[in-house]
Amino acid sequence: MNRSFVKTILFCFIASALITACKKEDDTENEVITTVVVQLKSTDGSIDRRFTWNDPDGDGGLPPTVEDIILARNKEYDAQVYFYDRSKSPEVNVTPEIERESDDHLLVYRINGALQLTITPTDADTKGRPFRLKTRWTTKGASTGSVLITLRHNPNKLLSNPDETGSVDAEVEFPVRIQ
């Protein structure tokens, strides 16, 4: 065999091995999520409730069932969002995996309607960038609207506004009433 031919084959083999070995592990798949739970605890200890959005058959089947979130005026609530895959038996709590992969996830909240609510992050990912699994909800006067919660996968958190980057793992909307 020609020496340069052997060198070329050896070079190609080593190059392909290095490329495969250096593949980013950030290319993880999106999570399967059928149920989202928002737990709200008032900072004064008077309320600790869970509100559920559930779509066990996934997109395109029956519509999801959604609990209305009802909050008191002029209160603060510590909030945490939980994610489940109930398409498996037993169900899988996906939240710990999302927490472990906080650098690869971002929760985004959009307040709709005339809702007098402010949502403030109380956590960050391992690099100190936005994560927002835990937040503080502050209510003002009586009002109605909704909160759209989006879990983004592989967002670009280096941007000044990473909220529209990455793919969507889950997007759910809770009707909210402050009374």
Image (cartoon, helix red, strand yellow):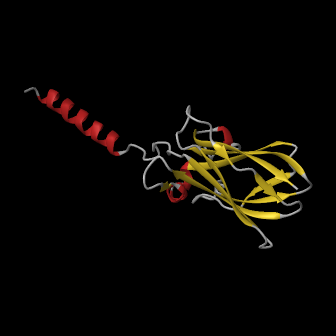
Instruction: Report the side of 18 relative to 177 (left or right).
Output: left
Residue 129 location, quadrant: bottom right
Instruction: Report the side of 171 relative to 44 (left or right).
Output: left
Residue 29 rendering spot, x and y as whole percentages = 46, 42
Residue 84 rendering spot, x and y as whole percentages = 53, 52
State the residue at coordinates (56%, 35%): 59
Residue that lies at the very extreme toward the bottom in this rendered image: 45
Residue 131 rendering spot, x and y as whole percentages = 63, 54
Residue 39 location, quadrant: bottom right
Quadrant where the C terminus is found in the figure = bottom right
Instruction: Report the side of 144 relative to 84 (left or right).
Output: right
In depth, the one of 50 and 93 nearer the eye is 50
Q: How many callouts does the rendering have?
A: 0
Quadrant where the N terminus is found in the figure = top left
In depth, the one of 144 and 29 nearer the eye is 144
In depth, the one of 161 and 169 nearer the eye is 169
Name above or below for residue 162 compared with residue 98: above
State the residue at coordinates (66%, 43%): 172
Residue 159 visible here: no
State the residue at coordinates (58%, 49%): 35
Name above or below for residue 11 compared with residue 84: above
In depth, the one of 102 and 179 nearer the eye is 179
Name above or below for residue 119 compared with residue 28: below
Residue 139 rendering spot, x and y as whole percentages = 85, 57
Residue 14 visible here: yes
Residue that lies at the very extreme toward the left in this rendered image: 1
State the residue at coordinates (79%, 49%): 176
